[in-house]
Amino acid sequence: MPRPLQVALIGAKFMGRAHSNAWRQAGCFFDLPRPIALHTIAARDAQELEAFAAQWGWPNWTVRWKDIAEDTSIDLVDIGTPNHVHKEQALAMLEAGKHVACEKPLASTLAEARDMKDAAKRAKGKTFVWFNYRRCPAVALAHQLVAEGRLGSIYHVRAHYLQSWGGPKTPLSWRFDKKRAGSGAHGDLNAHIVDMTRFVTGEEITEVHGAVARTFIKERVRPGSTAKRPGKGKSTVDDAVLFLASLTNGATASFEATRLAAGHQNRNSIEINGSKGSLRFDFEDMNVLWFHDETESPRTAGWRRIMCTNVAGQHPYAENWWPDAHVLGYEHGFTNMAADIVRALSRKKPTVALPDFASAYETQRVLEAALISAKERCAIKMREVR
Ligand SMILES: NC(=O)c1ccc[n+]([C@@H]2O[C@H](COP(=O)([O-])OP(=O)(O)OC[C@H]3O[C@@H](n4cnc5c(N)ncnc54)[C@H](O)[C@@H]3O)[C@@H](O)[C@H]2O)c1
């Protein structure tokens, strides 16, 4: 029996739950080259942490994340903390010789992301970034169909990620603080659809032609403020960012991210038009990929609704889960990724490519180009952004 991969996780809230679940489930649903062992969970609040560790099965917990770097029995450190701490934690773990799986966006600034990419290049350990949507079966299938040439030459990409939770009643948190988040909807949501575009098309962004960034809600209630003791603070990030770009093959691409799209709760969506056909995906109907084959007779051609959990159809990850069309959810993307990480660490091929720090740095460069473009009101060539 190979030695288990000992995993530690920093961050015990939203992503803490998603990642704990993934590390627990991956070995149950995938035939992995080595088992996974949950070792230590770290975060800031000791009281919450103790309960979290008990609930999710972490045998050890600590409020001193640096202890993890010193523990030689830990192989991989998973970082699910706010963006401004990714760099310090990732660098400490890479220097300690550990593998690192970090949440997106890679960092709160491009300079931090560059330091992380450079540290990863020097390090012994491997790096991974949780662009989990690559591992929805429908998105992975879209990537395969494009790679097989089923869309021909790609002309247009239209990607948008619309959420609605950021209205005026939503209180301040690190997500509205530029120093901690880096940006708002942009780093949070555009990061995902830039990665998805790069992944599905296999093309890189060459230029950002123009961008608009808006902060509609400039002040927000401080958490814990009451009618008796009201308190407001400034939101220093964007609520929405839109931009136009070109891809390496000459295709046009548009990106749009907002947290103020009432009625669109998690509409992470991509549409691709090529010379031989088109694809569209919307996470709110995440098991489905829409495909139009332009080479078919116009008499019967039309949009085909593909339920992407078909075992006989060899849809990515389908065989690891349930019978056909018994559908997957949000958490499965993370579990699929945890399984692929374990495979990659044993020199086995992941189902689809895993983004590392170098790849996430490319996505961060695109985000930076859009922010510069919005500020300077001009086009930015990607080669100008380092
Ligand atoms: N892949 C995705 O779809 C996805 C979704 C949501 C969030 N994220 C990313 O995950 C990261 C975490 O987001 P979240 O929503 O889980 O945040 P959160 O606020 O829900 O949780 C943050 C956790 O980090 C801990 N923490 C904060 N500062 C720390 C420090 N200095 N040292 C140790 N622990 C610290 C907190 O105690 C908390 O447990 C962010 O980078 C975010 O962009 C990714």
Image (cartoon, rainbow, N blue to C red):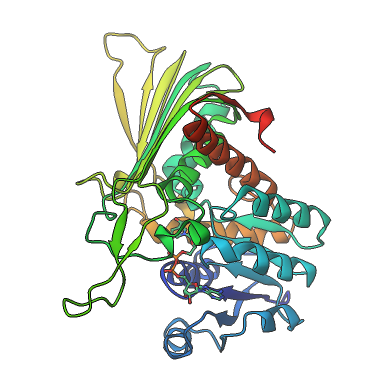
Q: Could you tell me which quadrant the C terminus lies in?
A: top right
Q: Quadrant of residue 106?
A: bottom right
Residue 96 location in percent, x, y? 78, 72
Q: Name the foreground residue: 88 vs 300.
A: 88
Where 263 sits versus 143, above or below? Answer: below
Residue 143 location in percent, x, y? 52, 35
Q: Quadrant of residue 124?
A: bottom right
Identify the residue at image location x=28%, y=77%: 224
In this rendering, does residue 312 appear at all? no
Residue 202 location in percent, x, y? 59, 31
Where 370 sits versus 124, above or below? Answer: above
Q: Name the foreground residue: 332 vs 215.
A: 215
Q: Name the foreground residue: 205 vs 226.
A: 226
Identify the residue at image location x=67%, y=30%: 384
Identify the residue at image location x=47%, y=50%: 183
Q: Could you tell me which quadrant the N terminus lies in?
A: bottom right
Where 375 sits versus 332, above or below? Answer: above
Left or right position of 291 against 224: right
Q: Residue furthest top?
A: 298
